[in-house]
Amino acid sequence: MAAIKATAVRVIVVALLITAAAAADAYTNHTVGGDAGWFFNSTTNKTSADYNAWAANQTFSLGDYLIFNTNTNQTVIQTYNKTTYDSCTMDDSLDTDTFQYGGGSNQFGSATVISVPLVIEGTQYYFSDADDGGQCQHGMAFEIKVSHGLGLPPSLNQPPPPAYVPPPAAADEGQSPPITVVTSPPSGGGMRTSANFFGLVLVLLVVLSFLALGTV
């Protein structure tokens, strides 16, 4: 009985170790170019590695990351558009199929690490468009194909953001407030008119009285 229990424990431990190893290997961080990194020598016009050869020896799956060990002299452009890739420039690209990572630095030669998650299955392209595309034209580019693998992990499998709804139009600040037009005379206006009429009649009666007395 004790031997059976010991055997069961060993089986459980081995199963846990296999599960842990599988989980550890589920998603991979691919360091682009290996130890050579993502660099371009502008003096010799040479890249620090053969990136297409490096990519050909890798297996890419959803949820993996590309790790670019580089500096600010290079850029990282991701695109799903082969025309953009072949042109080595983002000039005619779309916001929906081409993305730049780690751009906007004003300092040259500053070390940086850029991580790019693989979230779309299929073929995608990477290049540096620095030096007006010259780096890309001299080999600073590569193509990969991403398989489904285990699918996206929960951390990357997020629903898309809600559709943008423009705010309601604000009222024109220069618009004048509405004006109420009065189509009838104010209350009491008729009484004032009658009072004026009776006053005039009274004055006429007084004048006529004086005239009558003067003739007597």
Image (cartoon, grey):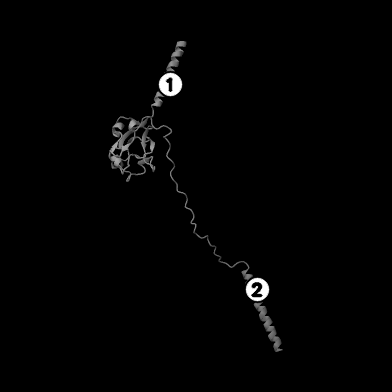
Q: Earlier in the sequence, mark 2 or mark 1?
A: 1
**SS at badge 1:** helix
State left or right for residue 144 relative to residue 173: left
Residues packed near mark 1 inside 10 Å, few (<14), some (14 to 19) or many (20 plus)? few
Point out residue 168 in the picture as x, y percentages from the top left corner.
47, 50
Point out residue 1 in the picture as x, y percentages from the top left corner.
47, 10
With respect to residue 72, does 175 lie above or below? below
Q: Amino acid at mark 1?
A: Leu
Mark 1 highlights which residue? 16
Q: Which mark is residue 89?
A: none
Residue 82 in view: no
Q: Amino acid at mark 2?
A: Ala
**SS at badge 2:** helix
Q: Residue furthest front?
A: 43
Comparing 33 with 126, the one in front is: 33
Mark 2 highlights which residue? 195
Comparing 2 with 60, the one in front is: 60
Instruction: Measure the C-alpha gap from mark 2 to mark 1.
Output: 109 Å
Asked whether the beta carbons under mark 2 and mark 1 sit within 8 Å of each other, the answer is no
Comparing 34 with 93, the one in front is: 34
Point out residue 56 in the picture as x, y percentages from the top left corner.
29, 31
